[in-house]
Image (cartoon, grey):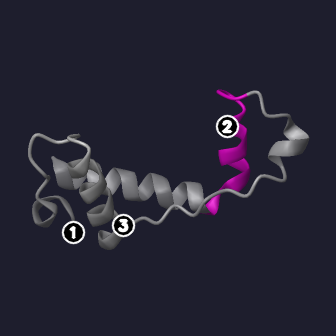
Amino acid sequence: MVEKFREAIAESLAYADSHPDEVREVVTTYTKIPPAVLKRVALPKWPAEPNRASVERLVKLGDGSDLFKQAPDLDKLLP
């Protein structure tokens, strides 16, 4: 189940990364950013694979703020 979810997320991120105009169109459905401004907005890169170092940093930040009862096992969660 986790693998299928990860594959779906990777597919959607790859699609978003290669279709910036469609991403901008979706943004108009939940923001009030004027179209002229939105055309100039720099969209982030959406890597299809997680950056382990970044995720480890987020785990450390979350662990230090009592966000987790138990830190996630990244070896089980990441490819």
Name the amino acid, label 3. Answer: Ser
Kindly identify which residue carries mark 1: 79
Question: Dot 3 corresponds to which residue?
Answer: 54
Query: Which image quarter is the C terminus in?
Result: bottom left
Q: Which residue does the image show at 42% across and 64% down from the upper left?
A: 48
User: Which residues make up the magenta segment?
Assistant: 18-31
**Position of residue 32 measured from the top left corner of the image (x, y, whole percent):** 76, 27
The label number, if any, that marks residue 68 in the structure image: none
Tag 3 secondary structure:
helix
Q: Residue at x 71, y 44 (%)?
A: 24
- Taking the spot 23% from the left edge, 50% from the top edge, the residue there is 64
Q: Secondary structure at mark 2?
A: helix
Q: Amino acid at mark 1?
A: Pro
Instruction: Give me the C-alpha separation between circle 2 and circle 3.
Output: 25 Å
Q: Are marks 1 and 3 in contact (CB under 8 Å)?
A: no
Q: Is residue 52 above or below residue 23?
A: below
Q: Residues within 10 Å of mark 1 (few under 14, many from 20)?
A: few
Looking at the rendered structure, which numbered label has been put on residue 27? 2
Asked whether 56 or 66 is in front, the reply is 66
Q: Earlier in the sequence, mark 1 or mark 3?
A: 3
Of discs 2 and 3, which sits in the foreground? Answer: 3
